[in-house]
């Protein structure tokens, strides 16, 4: 079942019934079950959830970045007419970094510490922008090396970095977290990818630095039309820069809709509980939270995985897995409460 | 309001960075650089700041886990910073700390009962035969069950582990508790549980808290007053509501505005603070914040501002705070 | 709460922990190599202990000569043949195992007893004393262990006990270095700080908090170290500085059997192979144990 909402637009990425399991010694665990969502060009989609909900696994599974799980994936991930799950690793290698780029939580640890920032960036520029180098060479009558360096400086300035000359000569450990993440974003955008996946990209940064990075990402998305899949546990980030929000719980997407819909009209009991637990400036009531703990993936509850903690649980919830229901245009929820016909108890 | 429990006066905590060959220190990390503040009995004082501002060091300094270079710490009026180990030992049960990473705070080879017993052992007035009873009471206080006493830390979730740490901190019947980023490693819903538990315990046991965090939004929920720290100094301290509604220091405003609000209808708030957090090795002259402050003047570059009292227990260190506040430059 | 309820809860938890340990044991036993090596070690060590009863010709094992049956290959009477003095090789190997097994354990345990506390101190306290310890470690480690032991044995005089003690001297620094590294990284653990906050002193923290958490890697290190220790004993004995003839010793047997290598090859190969088996068994056992002693 498709979750397409803007029927006049075709999604750039369409995930259908993605399931990932992990075969352990105590039996297999379904880390992801029936993940379905679509990403439209130029939009920012948030994938929110708490620890262990599988949001990071979802993102990494799209690009087959978890070797232990690559054979345990099922479903379909349509991108530009091809199923990413079907691609060979060579073909997928061409997609990664090129059409779909990714940035992670600790930027400094994903920069090669042995080379300078400049060396790494220039190598990528030569790979992705050979024509631009050639044009610049002819225009300014400079050699390839100088042209590449100039492009590098331009790209760094685009993401708000200053002193680009010095920066290109620095090493990973010499720069701050904020600078490193901007650098990684610049690298990611070199190939003008259609999709940028940000996996907790600002969680390790100070809040003032985070504000910069979030604004930068939003600007880049608007300017270049890059769709962003933003994975985070921070609902504030989702509210501020994302167009749509998908809420995950224990390997399933429980609700998905526009940011306004999710925050103002949350449907799923878990979404509601989550919103009530978030501390908000200017609100002084005691925080309310959902009791209980997230389920053990190796031994999840039957039916709806949330039912043991749900205030509105009914008999059917422990027996049958709920299906995706479109409650209103573009707003989907996976919960028995919203079934057209609620079976009698 | 003479009931001051903790009285800090011009505290400086420096760490040696480089030593010359002869052993003399050439550069210091000025983690806490001249902090003066009072914590009142029964209050929850929040201490907020970004990474590297010295807030964790300040918490540890009060508990004497970090060495004080100069300044005085008074606990219930008694100076404690210079006491030797033996003289300070009677004070240890009175002040305890809950750390950031609950998993790292508990010895994986010790059962919960042993962990609690280790804390109970330093209380002079508790006999060994009472340990079992005391431990059970402590478990109950943090909403855990007696059977949990015989488990190892790894058998618990993050939130439960943090409760065990809180139980351990309460074991010695302290008057003062420092929470050092105690909820930062926890999920939102677990964090809510722990914060509610903390607020409840404070009321029931009449405790005094120092709550350290980088997250401004949670401060409002349990803190009475909040202090904002930047580059080793406290820039502002106000009653919690006042601090958020009308901050008096430009940095506080920037900090507040940088927090992403979980409300999609308020998206224009995030004013961006330029620049980088200063290094504690060589902080800026004059007002620490001047290189990044939109309103900085020549005076800010040369003169370090003194604490200007707004009302009792509320003050701010900024040369221009009155002018900025009157002009509404510090509000939305 | 009643003391009886308390005890009941304690017992229940204990039962659960026992089940967890039993599960780990089952995991261990599932690995074929682990079982094989454990069995091999058990057989060898039991044979060594009960040598006089297990060996077919205990007197020959100890050194009695039997010239009539010298240089015989594998036969029903002498399973592994006889050496140049006609002594039953099987018995010699069994008696030689005593030296190797006991010697190996002796070296490793003594080295740990010296090296671990020094490592604990150097890692925890650092400072001048710690620096002195680590420089000493580096100094001793820069010499090949066998040569050091060799030098000592030559000076003090040959003999099996001398050789063992001589080998301990270059052996302990390795433990100090490993432990010091572990302690350095453990020092940053918050539960250490928590104990300091309660006012506990350094010695208490070292033995109650640090040591239990480094014990697992140290034990694995020791097990994997027995093999090299056994070989070193063998080398020393082969050079005449360890066990003195006519006592059985694998190293000695290999050396004296070397002259007959082209003809009666079994005299040197059998004890050599025995050493190989024992060392491999210890290595495999240590490896398998490493996996289950992993922290949770």
Image: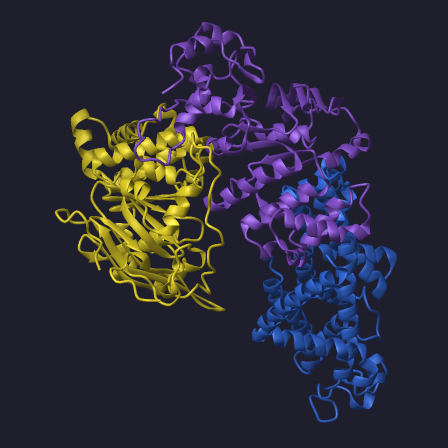
Q: Position of residue B240 (x, y in %)?
A: 51, 25
Q: Where is residue C115 in the image (x, y as percent from the top left)?
A: 75, 51
Q: What residue is rendered at 15% in x and 49% in y? A: A10
For this orientation, the residue located farthest to the left is A8
Q: Position of residue B64 (x, y in %)?
A: 70, 30
Q: What residue is rendered at 65% in x and 59% in y? A: B147
For this orientation, the residue located farthest to the bottom is C76
In the rendered image, the quadrant that contains the C terminus of chain A is bottom left
Coloring scheme used: by chain
For this orientation, the residue located farthest to the front is A344
In the rendered image, the quadrant that contains the N terminus of chain A is bottom left
The purple one among the chains is: B
The blue one among the chains is: C
Q: What residue is rendered at 41% in x and 53% in y? A: A53
Side (left or right) of A111 relative to B278: left
> Which of A78/B152 is in front?
B152
The yellow one among the chains is: A
Q: How many discs mark residues in the rendered view?
A: 0
Side (left or right) of C128 relative to B290: right
Q: Can residue B115 be seen by looking at this rendering?
A: no
Q: Can residue B212 be seen by looking at this rendering?
A: yes
A85 relative to A183, above or below: below
The part of the image, by quadrant, that contains residue A315 is: bottom left
The part of the image, by quadrant, that contains residue B210 is: top right
Q: Where is residue B27 in the image (x, y as percent from the top left)?
A: 61, 22
């Amino acid at each position: 079942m498709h979750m397409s909402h803007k029927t006049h637009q075709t999604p750039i990425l369409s995930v259908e019934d993605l399931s990932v399991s992990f075969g352990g010694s105590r039996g297999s665990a379904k880390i992801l079950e029936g993940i379905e969502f679509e990403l439209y060009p130029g939009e920012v989609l948030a994938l929110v959830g708490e620890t262990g909900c599988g949001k990071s696994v979802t993102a990494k599974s799209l690009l087959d970045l978890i070797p232990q799980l690559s054979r345990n994936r099922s479903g379909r991930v349509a991108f530009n007419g091809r199923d990413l799950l079907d691609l060979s690793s060579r073909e997928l290698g061409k997609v990664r970094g090129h059409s779909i780029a990714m940035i992670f939580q600790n930027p400094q640890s994903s920069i090669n510490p042995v080379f300078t920032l400049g060396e790494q960036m220039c190598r990528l520029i030569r790979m992705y922008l050979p024509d631009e180098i050639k044009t610049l060479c002819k225009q300014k009558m400079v050699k390839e090396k100088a042209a590449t360096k100039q492009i590098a400086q331009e790209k760094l300035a685009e993401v708000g970095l200053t002193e680009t000359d010095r920066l290109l000569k620095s090493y990973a450990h010499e720069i701050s977290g904020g600078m490193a993440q901007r650098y990684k974003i610049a690298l990611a955008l070199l190939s003008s990818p259609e999709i940028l996946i940000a996996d907790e990209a600002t969680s390790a940064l100070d809040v003032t630095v985070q504000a910069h990075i979030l604004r930068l990402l939003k600007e880049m998305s608007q300017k270049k039309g890059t769709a962003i899949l933003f994975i985070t546990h921070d609902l504030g980030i989702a509210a501020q820069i994302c167009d749509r929000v998908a809420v995950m719980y224990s390997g399933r997407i429980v609700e998905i809709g526009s940011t306004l819909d999710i925050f103002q009209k949350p449907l799923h009991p878990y979404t509601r509980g989550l919103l009530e637990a978030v501390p908000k400036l200017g609100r002084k009531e005691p925080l309310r939270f959902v009791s209980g703990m997230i389920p053990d993936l190796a031994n999840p509850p039957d039916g709806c995985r949330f039912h043991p903690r749900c205030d509105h649980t009914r008999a059917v919830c422990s027996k049958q897995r709920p299906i995706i229901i479109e409650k209103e245009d573009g707003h989907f929820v996976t919960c028995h409460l919203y079934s057209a016909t609620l079976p009698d108890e | 309001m003479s009931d001051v429990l903790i009285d800090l006066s011009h505290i400086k905590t420096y760490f040696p960075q480089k030593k010359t060959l002869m052993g003399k220190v050439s550069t210091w990390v000025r983690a806490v650089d001249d902090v003066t503040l009072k914590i009142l009995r029964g209050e929850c004082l929040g201490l907020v700041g970004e990474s590297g501002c010295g807030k964790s060091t300040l918490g540890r300094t009060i508990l004497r886990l970090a060495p004080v270079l100069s300044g005085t710490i008074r606990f219930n009026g008694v100076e404690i910073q210079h006491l030797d180990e033996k003289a300070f030992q009677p004070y240890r049960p009175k002040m305890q700390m809950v750390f950031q990473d609950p998993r790292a705070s508990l010895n994986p080879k010790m059962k919960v009962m042993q962990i609690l017993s280790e804390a109970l052992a330093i209380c002079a007035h508790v006999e060994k035969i009472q340990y079992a009873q005391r431990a059970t009471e402590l478990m109950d206080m943090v909403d855990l069950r007696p059977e949990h006493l015989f488990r190892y830390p790894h058998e618990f979730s993050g939130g439960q582990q943090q409760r065990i740490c809180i139980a351990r901190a309460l074991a010695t019947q302290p008057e003062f508790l420092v929470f050092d980023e105690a909820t930062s490693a926890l999920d939102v819903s677990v964090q809510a549980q722990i914060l509610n538990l903390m607020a409840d315990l404070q009321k029931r046991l009449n405790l005094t808290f120092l709550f350290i965090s980088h997250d401004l939004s949670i401060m409002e929920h349990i803190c009475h007053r909040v202090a904002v720290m930047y580059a080793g100094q406290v820039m502002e301290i106000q009653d919690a509501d006042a601090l958020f509604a009308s901050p008096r220091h430009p940095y506080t405003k920037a900090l507040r505005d940088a927090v992403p609000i979980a409300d999609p209808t308020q998206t224009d708030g995030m004013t961006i603070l330029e620049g980088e957090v200063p290094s504690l090795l060589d902080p800026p002259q004059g007002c620490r914040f001047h290189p990044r402050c939109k309103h900085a003047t020549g005076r800010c570059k040369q003169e370090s501002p003194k604490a200007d009292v707004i009302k009792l227990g509320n003050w701010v260190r900024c040369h221009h705070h009155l002018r900025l506040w009157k002009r509404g430059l510090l509000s939305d | 709460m009643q003391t009886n309820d308390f005890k009941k809860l304690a017992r229940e938890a204990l039962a659960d922990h026992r089940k967890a340990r039993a599960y780990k044991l089952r995991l261990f036993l599932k690995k074929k190599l682990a079982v094989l090596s454990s069995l091999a070690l058990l057989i060898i060590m039991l044979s060594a202990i009960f040598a006089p009863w297990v060996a077919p010709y205990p007197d020959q094992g100890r050194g009695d000569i039997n010239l009539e049956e010298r240089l015989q290959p594998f036969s029903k009477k002498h399973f592994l043949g006889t050496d140049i003095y006609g002594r039953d090789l099987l018995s010699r190997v069994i008696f030689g195992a005593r030296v190797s097994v006991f010697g190996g354990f002796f070296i490793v345990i003594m080295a740990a007893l010296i090296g671990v506390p020094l490592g604990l101190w150097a890692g925890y306290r650092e400072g001048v004393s710690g620096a002195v310890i680590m420089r000493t470690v580096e100094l001793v480690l820069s010499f090949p262990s066998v040569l050091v032991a060799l030098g000592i044995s030559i000076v003090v005089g040959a003999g099996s006990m001398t050789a063992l003690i001589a080998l301990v001297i270059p052996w302990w620094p390795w433990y100090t270095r490993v432990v010091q590294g572990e302690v350095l990284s453990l020092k940053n653990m918050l539960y250490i700080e928590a104990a300091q906050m309660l006012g506990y002193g350094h010695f208490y923290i070292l033995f109650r908090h640090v040591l239990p958490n480094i014990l697992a890697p140290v034990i694995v290190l020791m097990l994997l170290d027995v093999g090299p220790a056994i070989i070193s004993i063998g080398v020393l004995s082969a050079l005449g500085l360890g066990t003195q003839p006519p006592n059985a010793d694998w190293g000695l047997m290999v050396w004296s059997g070397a002259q007959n290598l082209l003809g009666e090859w079994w005299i040197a190969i059998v004890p050599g192979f025995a050493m190989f088996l024992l060392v491999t068994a210890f290595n495999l056992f240590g490896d398998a144990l490493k996996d289950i002693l992993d922290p949770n």
